[in-house]
Image (cartoon, grey):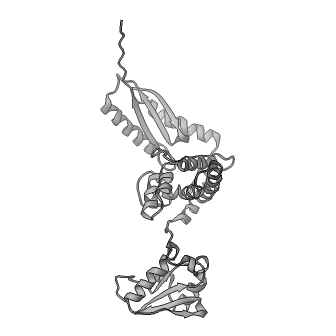
Amino acid sequence: MPSDIAPGIRLLVGLGNPGREYRDTRHNVGFMLLDRLAARERTEFRVEKSWQAEVARAGDLLLCKPLTYMNLSGQAVRPLSQFYKIEPSQVLVILDDMALPLGKLRFRTSYGQNVLAHSIECAHLAAMMADELGASAKTARRAALLHDIGKAVSHEIEGPHALVGGDLARRHSESEAVAHAMEAHHNEVEPQTVEAVIVQAADALSGARPGARGESLEQYVKRLRDLEGIATRHEGVDKVYAMQAGREIRVMVVPGALDDDGAVLLSHEIAREIEQELEYPGQIKVTVIRESRATDYAR
């Protein structure tokens, strides 16, 4: 077997579902790929009833197509790998769905709320609202389930988790409707679909549910005051508003005290001071607004 196919792999498993209704559909992409590999290497599959699978050998590499349904494929893969003494790290599985690190969210929390449990709850809420509004429940459910997936790779990829999640979804062939709803849930991009707004609402409902998050009212108010205090102490600042539960602050400056370049510099300075002085999950958006007005009278 050429080493360029799967270096270091001894067992290549293609997942699919038995039955004519699944033939040549995306659900059987694992089967189709292994069939092409077998044809290329001039080998044939044989049915192994004891392992509930079709098996072929191409050099040192075993090809396996479980004859169970996808969610039962372990019944074929486990005994086969045990018989040939193949370690899990030497098994490569090909399937139609995207391999996103959703399980990592189980170990992430946001103000005491488990992010995986939050994502599942959002999926249920979004599907219910979509059904009521006549929108796509499938799109809303999928986007809500994956809306925080960017947090699972925040240590690997820089940027807002909503945008990172949207890019990740596109790279794994999720629909544009799902990817857009994911990246719009914190208004990093403007929501353009009903499903995107539904995901925003589901996210807010799950986070605001009494008991969902462990932050006390006193801690919450203190955090907002600290944010506003950092911005207020700068010269030329008129008013400061903490928004979106402290995920964004908007700073209004006196037009005569700062020019446009000064407003840009001020946003950078406030952001750096927040990083140095406060502890917070995710990121905080700093927006400096400088308004200029010209007034005259027609007499």
Q: Is 28 above or below relative to 219? A: below
Residue 38 quadrant: bottom left
Q: Is 241 above or below relative to 182? A: above
Q: Nearer the viewer, residue 285 or 6?
A: 6
- Residue drawn where x is 48% and y is 57% of the image: 150
Image quadrant occupied by the N terminus: bottom left
- Residue 251, given in percent of the width and then of the height, sits at 44, 32
- Residue drawn where x is 50% and y is 60% of the image: 152
Inspect this view and state whether residue 92 appears: no
Inspect this view and state whether residue 189 appears: yes
Q: Is residue 57 left or right of residue 142?
A: left
Q: Residue furthest top?
A: 299
Q: Nearer the viewer, residue 198 or 39?
A: 39
- Residue 285, given in percent of the width and then of the height, sits at 45, 42
Q: Is residue 24 left or right of residue 69?
A: left
Image quadrant occupied by the C terminus: top left
Q: Residue furthest front?
A: 20
